[in-house]
Image: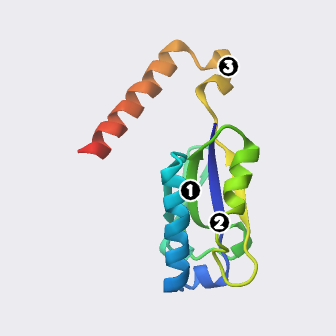
Amino acid sequence: MRFMILLKADETTEAGVMPDEQLLTEMGRYNDELVEAGVMLAGEGLQPSSKGARVKFAGKERTVIDGPFVETKELIAGFWIIQVASLDEAIAWVKRCPNPLEGESEIEIRQVFEAEDFGAEFTPELREQEERQRERMAAQQSS
């Protein structure tokens, strides 16, 4: 099972305040543990929403909304993607994470859909297409 671990933003991450050396060291150690256990697939911090944009869809219309975005609690400051056996194991890994922000912080855990979750609507042709896409992405990343 794959899970996306989402670090919620706060005022400091939205202000672009970088973590201090101690937190970077602790996070590096934590990420090493994830990698050594073979569960970490990806993980990155995200720039503040002031450097981002949203695209709003309404039928065929597309509207671009430039950041920053007002509701900090709904924003993401970083993420990991891990592969573990269960939600309980994902929770156990997140509980080992150093507190990533000053004071209180929140990390959300969401399971990633797998091909079998989509049922019959995910036809053999669509499965083959997805597999080709994954192969091309892997080849691009390794070159």
Q: How is the image coloured?
A: rainbow
State which quadrant residue 111 falls in.
Answer: top right
Pick whichever of labels 1 and 3 is earlier in the sequence: 1
- Say what secondary structure mark 2 lies in: loop
Residue ID at (45%, 19%): 128
| Disc 3/disc 2 C-alpha distance (Å) | 35 Å
Q: What residue does disc 2 label?
A: 97
Q: Which mark is residue 15?
A: none
Pick whichever of labels 1 and 2 is earlier in the sequence: 1
Residue ID at (36%, 39%): 137
| Disc 1/disc 3 C-alpha distance (Å) | 27 Å
State which quadrant residue 80 falls in.
Answer: bottom right
Comparing 29 with 120, the one in front is 29
Q: Is residue 120 left or right of residue 52?
A: right
Q: Which mark is residue 80?
A: 1
Q: Three-letter amino acid code at disc 1?
A: Trp
Inspect this view and state whether residue 64 appears. no
